[in-house]
């Protein structure tokens, strides 16, 4: 997890899936060529957070009058007392005033910010996800910023599907395929289920790309959220996740990056498309 070490109201980040750290080469000139907007990517609906990346999303069937939603990583949110949220915990319907910036199609930052009214849900257990509800509706966002939300695909993606990862923090895009579905991804005390492993050569994401949407470029729908990657080849440590198979075998590969699937949100929606963790069959972490 590669976040900035930074604390915001209900919005601290950590070192997980790639928020930005305030130390190391990420802040040096060596990375300048990596953070330029790359041609060929459409950044409409992509947002920049103070420490991570994210996207303006909507569920299938959402109304234009519904409050806008921002998707990012749970580790970009932080715990109640700063730092990163502990494992086996979640936040649910927490007031928030966190702000976000929208990107234009070419990756440039649009003027102005939009504010959250609530952190609907966040966790780093099973899925590294967070969902904010905004003060403005989708229609108001469209009128004020000219931005449309990206649909969260209700279907599970498939092996070898093409994907794009668009970072609002770095204004940079990545392209590759889904290489494997990992039974468990372990990073320190954190465990994710059924994570997507990206194919080599194209999706070696860096710190600051945490929370970027993983898009199916054929439909331009969200199928996941970028989460983490193995920096140095260590086994199951922070910033060095390991893959754990059903029979307990551990695989580690330096440079591999991973994302978590987002179709699971639909299992927790009620008939009004409101998040309800008490719904039978809800696949998000709840205790």
Image: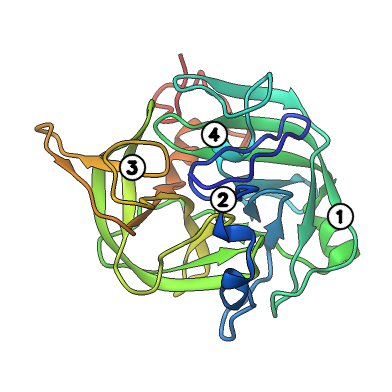
Looking at the image, tell me whether mark 2 or mark 1 is earlier in sequence order: 1
The residue sitting at 82% across, 49% down in the picture is 137
Depth order, front residue of 190/66: 190
* Secondary structure of the residue carrying numbered label 2: loop
**Label 4, on which residue?**
269
Q: Residues within 10 Å of mark 1 (few under 14, many from 20)?
A: few
Residue 231 horizontal/vertical position (percent)? 39, 52
**Label 3, on which residue?**
241
Q: Quadrant of the C terminus?
A: top left
Is 103 situated above or below 226? below
Left or right side of 284 for 171 = right
Closer to the observer: label 3 or label 1? 3
What is the spatial separation of the Cα atoms under label 1 and label 4, in whole angstroms?
A: 28 Å
Q: Residues within 10 Å of mark 3 (few under 14, many from 20)?
A: many
Depth order, front residue of 184/253: 253
Looking at the image, tell me whether mark 2 or mark 3 is earlier in sequence order: 2
Looking at the image, tell me whether mark 4 or mark 2 is earlier in sequence order: 2
Left or right side of 174 for 78 = right
Residue 233 horizontal/vertical position (percent)? 29, 50
**Label 2, on which residue?**
211
Looking at the image, tell me whether mark 3 or mark 1 is earlier in sequence order: 1
**Label 1, on which residue?**
113
Is 154 situated above or below 200? above
Depth order, front residue of 262/20: 20
Is 72 situated above or below 273? below
């Amino acid at each position: 997890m590669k976040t900035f070490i930074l604390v915001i109201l209900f919005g601290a980040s950590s070192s997980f899936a790639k928020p930005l750290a305030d130390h190391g080469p990420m802040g040096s000139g060596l990375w300048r060529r990596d953070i330029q907007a790359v041609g060929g990517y459409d950044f409409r609906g992509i947002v920049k957070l103070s420490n991570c990346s994210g996207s303006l999303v909507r569920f299938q069937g959402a109304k234009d009058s519904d409050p806008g939603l921002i998707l990012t990583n749970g580790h970009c949110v932080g715990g109640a007392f700063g730092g990163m949220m502990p494992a086996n915990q979640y936040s649910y319907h927490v007031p928030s005033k966190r702000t976000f910036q929208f990107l234009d199609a070419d990756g440039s930052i649009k003027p102005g910010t939009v504010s959250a009214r609530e952190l609907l849900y966040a966790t780093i257990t099973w899925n590294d996800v967070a969902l904010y509800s905004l003060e403005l509706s989708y229609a108001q966002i469209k009128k004020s910023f000219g931005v449309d939300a990206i649909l969260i695909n209700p279907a599970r993606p498939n092996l070898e599907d093409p994907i794009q990862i668009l970072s609002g923090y770095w204004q940079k895009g990545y392209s590759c395929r889904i290489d494997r579905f990992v039974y468990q991804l372990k990073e320190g005390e954190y465990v994710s289920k059924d994570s997507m492993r990206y194919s080599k050569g194209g999706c070696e994401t860096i710190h600051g790309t945490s929370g970027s949407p993983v898009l199916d470029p054929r439909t331009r729908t969200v199928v996941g959220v970028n989460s983490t990657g193995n920096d140095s080849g260590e086994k199951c440590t922070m910033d060095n996740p390991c893959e754990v198979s059903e029979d307990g075998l551990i695989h580690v590969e330096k440079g591999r990056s991973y994302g978590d699937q987002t179709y699971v949100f639909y299992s927790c929606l009620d008939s009004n498309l409101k998040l309800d963790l008490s719904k039978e069959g809800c696949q998000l972490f709840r205790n």
